[in-house]
Image (spheres, grey):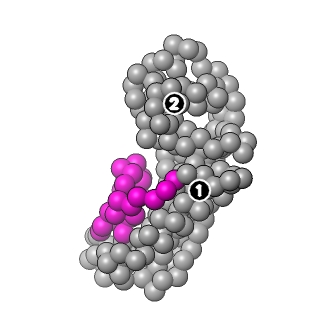
Amino acid sequence: MGSAEKGQKLVLASASPRRRDLLAQVGITPDTILHLSVDESPLGEETPRQMAARLADLKAAAARILPEAEGAFVLTADTVVGVGRRILGKPADDAEARRFLELLSGRAHQVFTGVVLTTPDRQIARRTVMTRVIFKRLSKAEIDAYIVSQEGQGKAGGYAIQGRAEAFVRTISGSYSNVVGLPLHETVNLLTGHGYQLY
């Protein structure tokens, strides 16, 4: 049974097919998907955690004013990869993707996802989730092959853990789905905790 059949409406304000797939994995199908465009440039001394939370809020504010959001649960999210205080966004080109992979090689990094839920009565709930990931040391050949695959283009940090890059992961501490783009445990808890009927 879809959410509309239960007298509720869910809007996913994200163009990411990965977030849509993750929701489907736990039986959630958004009634509407909105493609929002916001400025994803980091601000000054902003940390990766702060940036993930701010961008999710920015997307939520942009979505709330749209007609599709009227009377709906609206879910927005943003994922940021950080190495210390350094933010690794979506690589602009192959050269930047290579620099990101060289930086991640053999070391730990953090993946932050900010999640914002706006309820039909305009309550706002937020979570920011962090997962720690350690990559093995990557050879030049591995980096070259990954760049050629183009899997990392359009992905925070220049890689997609749900693809070939999963072979790069030595250890992961925390939510795997968070690294893909949406922490499912926290997202489902946000929804059901604010009245969304999942079952």
**Residue type of the residue flagged with mark 1:** Ala
Q: Nearer the viewer, residue 165 or 28?
A: 165
In the depicted structure, whether residue 41 falls above or below residue 75: above
Residues shaded magenta: 11-40
Disc 1: CA contacts within 10 A as few (<14), some (14-19) or many (>=20): many
Q: Residue furthest front?
A: 44
Q: Nearer the viewer, residue 195 or 65?
A: 65
- From the image, tell me which residue sits under label 2: 97
Q: Please determine whether, in this image, residue 40 is positioned above or below residue 67.
A: above
Which residue is at 47% across, 36% downward? 92
Residue in view at x 55 percent, y 38 percent: 157
Q: Which residue is mark 1?
A: 52
The picture places residue 83, in percent across and down from the top left corner, at: 68, 39
CB contact under 8 Å: marks 1 and 2: no
Position of residue 1 measured from the top left corner of the image (x, y, whole percent): 28, 70
Q: Which dot marks residue 21?
A: none
Against 52, is 199 above or below?
below
